[in-house]
Image: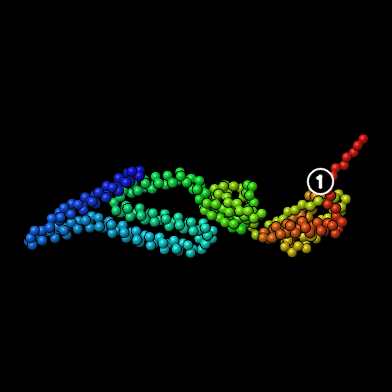
Amino acid sequence: MLVQFCETVEETTLEVSDSINKGYSAVADLPDNFSEVGDYLKKLLTMLEEFAVTYGGRLLIALVVLIVGFKLINAAVRKLKAAKAMQKIEPSARQFLLAVMNVVLKIIVGITALAIMGVPMTSIIAVVGSCGLAIGLALQGSLANIAGGFVLMLTRPFKVGDFLKFNDTTGTVEEIGIFHTKILTIDNRRVVVPNATISNSTLVNFFALPESRVDLTFTASYSDDVDKVERVLLNVCDRNEKIMKDPAPFARVSAHKDSAIEYTVRAWVNSADYWQVCFDLQHDVKRAFDENGITIPFPQVDVHTK
C-alpha cells in the first residue's frame, strides 16, 4: 500500500513536471525581432493561465485549507483546555489527550490538503491504515497501557489521594498517567503499575466515599462480665471525638474463642480519619481494659492426665 501511495504521488509530480516542461518548451525560444514579441507574450500568458487554472487553484485552496485548518484547530484545543469538563481530568492525562487531539486533527487537515492537490483519497487511507497497523504491532504493550489510561479517565474508579488495595499492592494514589499509575505504599515506597494491569484488576478503594466504618475485634477472658466489657468499649468510642455519634458506635460479643470471648467494635468516621481512629481505638481500649481490671488472655490449653 505504501508503494502504491508513493507511485501515486510520483505520478502526480510527473504530471505537474510534464505540464511545466511543455509550457517551458513553448516559450523557451526568445523572439528574434520586435515583431515577434507580441506572439511570445501571448504564449507566455497562455502557459501561465493554463498552469494557474490546472494547478494554481488546487495549490491555493490546499494552502488556505492548511492555514485556516491549523488555526481553527489551535483555537479549538485552547478552548477545550479551558473547559470545565476537561479540568476534572488529571493534569498529565489532560495534556496527553489534548496533544493527541491536536495531532490527529492536523493529520486530517493535511490529508484533506493532499486530496485537494490531486492525490487519490484511497491511496492516502491505505497508507494511514498500513502505518497504523505497523505502529500498533510494534507498540501493542504501550497501546494497551494507553487504552487502560483512557478507561481510568472515563470510569474514574479512583483519584489522586485515594487509598487502594489491588493484588499485592496497598497504598495511596500519587499520580495517574497515560502509561502508568504511581502508588505510594505505607512504608513510603513508590510502586509504578501499568495502566493495563490496574484497569483489569479488582480494586478496593477505601476512601471512595466520604464516610468509612472502622471494624475491630478485641478479646477478654471468660471470667470478665460481658456487659461490663461492652460498656467499656462503648465508653472508649464515645470519648473519641473523631467517631460519629450517628450512626452510633457498636460493641457486642461476636464469638466464643478457645481461650477468650471475642468482641466486635464498629464505628463510623470520616474517611480521612480512618487510620487515626483505628490506631487510637486499639491504644485506648488497652488502657481502658487495664483501668477496669479486664483481662486480655493469652492462648492456653488445658491438659488432663489419667
Residue 113 position, x and y percent, is 33, 55
Number of marks in the image?
Answer: 1
- Spot occupied by residue 180 in the image (x, y as percentages of width and height): 55, 52
Give the image location of residue 118, x and y in percent. Answer: 29, 51
Which class describes the residues within 10 Å of circle 1: few (<14), some (14-19), or many (20+)? few
Instruction: Answer with left or right where residue 183 lies relative to residue 125.
Output: right
Splitting the image into 4 quarters, where does residue 102 fall? bottom left
Disc 1 residue type (three-letter): Lys
Relative to 35, say whether 303 is above or below. Answer: above
Residue at x-position 78% and y-position 49%: 254
**How is the structure coloured here?**
rainbow
- For image coordinates 75% across by 53% down, the residue present is 216
- What quarter of the picture does the C terminus occupy? top right
Give the residue at mark 1: 257
User: Where in the figure is residue 291, as x and y percent of width and height?
Assistant: 85, 59
Q: Is residue 131 visible?
A: yes
Q: Is residue 267 visible?
A: no
Describe the element under mark 1 as helix, strand or loop: loop
Instruction: Describe residue 126's horizontal placement relative to residue 152 as left or right.
Output: left
Q: Residue furthest top?
A: 306
At a point 46% along the width and 62% down the height, the residue shown is 80
The quadrant the N terminus occupies is top left
Identify the residue at horizontal 24%, vertical 49% (top origin).
15
